[in-house]
Image (cartoon, coloured by chain):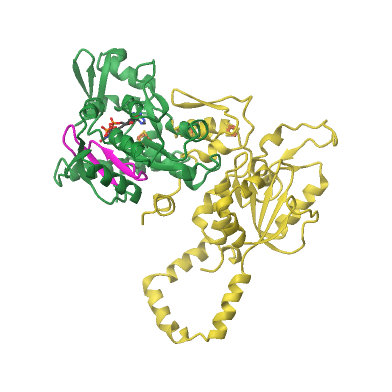
Amino acid sequence: MVLGKYLDIMTVKTTDKTLQKYSQDGGIVSSLLIHALETGVIEGAIVAMPTDEPWNPEPYVATTPEEIIAAAGTKYVLCPLNNALKIAARENGLDKIGMVGMHCLTYAVRKMQLYPFGARHLPNKMALLLGIFCTENFSYTGIKAIVEELHKVNIEHVQKMDVSKGKMIVTSNMGERVEVPVKLTHSYVQPGCYICPDLTARTADISTGSIGSPDGWSTVMPRTKVGKDLFQSAVDMGLFETKPIDPGKFGMEMLTRLAQNKWDRSEKTRAERAEIGLPNPF
Amino acid sequence: MSPFWKKEKKSDAENIAEMQTASPAAAEEKTDAAQPEITVKPAEAEAEVKEMAAAKPKVLTAVMSGCTGCLISLVDNYDILLDLLDAIDYRYETTLADVRQIPDDQMDIAIVHGSICLQDKRQVDDIRKIRQNSTFLVAMGGCASSGCVTRYSVGGQAATPSHESFVPVANLVKVDFALPGCPTGPEVIANTILAAVGADLEYLKPLAELAGFACGCDLLTKIIGNGLCIGCGTCAMSCPTRAIDMDYGRPHVNQELCIKCGACYAQCPRSFEPTFEMIEKRVMGVE
Ligand SMILES: Cc1cc2nc3c(=O)[nH]c(=O)nc-3n(C[C@H](O)[C@H](O)[C@H](O)COP(=O)(O)OP(=O)(O)OC[C@H]3O[C@@H](n4cnc5c(N)ncnc54)[C@H](O)[C@@H]3O)c2cc1C
Ligand code: SF4
Ligand code: SF4
Ligand code: SF4
């Protein structure tokens, strides 16, 4: 099953006005992190925090709702969140760590939990992994080139970036909106993404992304007991508005098709690599 | 399942043949034929239980040239240490028990920590003897698996100035499973021992590939150099000397700080990939 194992799937959005403003899609990630923090499920969360260099975030151990909100929104750029795992445990002294991440980040955490060669006593400190859907990512120079050369917007003036319906959309802080076909950005994609098999972050406790739900809403998939319980308690407290996911063309069908495409792209790339004698992960 | 350490290694052809006989049709035939044999007498069952208890794998741990930090790491499994010790028949330990002579009896699992000093005849003899007398040899920690910090020893030091060549165990004898890291994590040691006890070959398989020279530059040559890096920062997180900085989404290794422990490459999600099924079952608790 290309979507991995999940306990439930639905269309969701936050009821919090602030989060609706700052979040990327349905505000799921930030709401859940704040809720987990406030209910003691986690003591802090590793997020992608903006820095002085626009659109070049760095890993940050957020321990307050304000910090989590400050990190809301998608940055289409590499941010080595896993590097902050030990900082969270040793410097912040957290016993219950939360983290957000695409497939590759959450998968690396799971591998670390299974084989902690260089991660003494970290496996049991991972309390919550929130997964975000992902098709590909870019280096900082890559995304800068895309917005400055294709969208013709200075990266310092970019307010929001989004990928939707085959377009990469950049909104400037002057309110200007520029769209470019995603196809044109492909030559900037980080090479390692092409063998990535997993769209929906199947190793997370809860996965979320925009695919499959209308604008301003998110698709949400609780996968583990931890994830399901946290999500349910957030719904019970009125933090989310939920509705069944559309089974049709723009809902489940699209999600499944895009996940299958990514799986196939990975298989194909791995086969091509093998053919020219390049090693794949073993 | 018969215990892993008792299993003879089979050729691919034999494995395939075994899988084929395990097909549903073959299984059905077997159960039919096997049915009358189910009546086991209580005394026999008891004997069988006893035999199973006696079948705990015999384990040895031995230190070569190292700081014994990896042994401390094993002990650092406090929560489950007693369970761990209960799962094995712990026969020999050089550091905790003051014994010197590697025993002559056959071991199921030999766990070696520390690199081998080529000028130390005793170590060379010992590692050869350990290899000969054991079914599986585990190189526990950086020194045993890759040489780690002992790689920097170049001799001329008191009290044995001629001791200058410190090499990974795999340079002298075959290593079955290696656990990189300085020290290697307590939990990965526990997982490995329990996997060996529980015949969990899926867990052990990638560890077979991790023995031998290691360096932070493996990230350059094997990961980035093969177009595999995805900028997750796991390598930097795992480095015991903080030799790795993440620079615009790629690891930058400070060679002055790298002690060649091998943790970064082993920990990288793009060196070996555990299956989704294993992660779901063993870490996420979903079936
Ligand atoms: C590189 C990338 C590619 C994506 N591709 C897709 C896609 O193809 N289809 C799809 O449906 N969704 C995709 N998403 C997810 C989507 O853009 C939203 O992040 C997701 O729906 C969560 O929205 P939200 O409103 O719930 O989260 P928010 O409340 O806005 O929170 C977003 C969280 O993501 C973290 N974050 C932001 N950027 C990064 C980053 N680079 N690395 C790690 N964490 C980060 C933030 O710190 C924040 O905690 C992608 C996300 C990223 C980072
Ligand atoms: S495509 Fe895969 S490897 Fe690339 S950023 Fe997304 S999850 Fe990571
Ligand atoms: S860079 Fe760090 S983790 Fe990698 S081999 Fe060197 S010391 Fe070990
Ligand atoms: S651990 Fe992550 S950042 Fe480091 S080399 Fe591997 S993929 Fe790249």
Q: Was residue B91 drawn as part of the magenta stretch in this picture?
A: no
Tell me which residue sits at (38%, 16%) in the image. Answer: A53
Tell me which residue sits at (35%, 45%) in the image. Answer: A205
Image vertical order of residue A14 relative to residue B114, above or below: above
Image vertical order of residue B20 relative to residue B163, above or below: below
Let me know if residue A274 appears in the view.
no
Question: Toward which corner of the image does residue B260 lie, by quadrant?
Answer: top right
- A53 sits to left or right of A237: right
Q: Was residue A216 drawn as part of the magenta stretch in this picture?
A: yes
- B29 sits to left or right of A22: right
Give the magenta-colored segment's residue range: A200-222
For the stretch drawn in magenta, the main secondary structure is loop
**Residue B100 picture location, percent across and down:** 80, 53
Question: Toward which corner of the image does residue B49 lie, by quadrant?
Answer: bottom right
**Residue A242 picture location, percent across and down:** 18, 42
Tell me which residue sits at (62%, 59%) in the image. Answer: B85
**Residue B79 picture location, percent across and down:** 55, 52
Instruction: Give the colour chain A carries in the figure.
Output: green
- A121 sits to left or right of A177: right
Taking depth in this image into account, of A41 and B113 the one nearest to the observer is A41
Taking depth in this image into account, of B218 and B281 the one nearest to the observer is B281
Instruction: Give the colour chain B carries in the figure.
Output: yellow
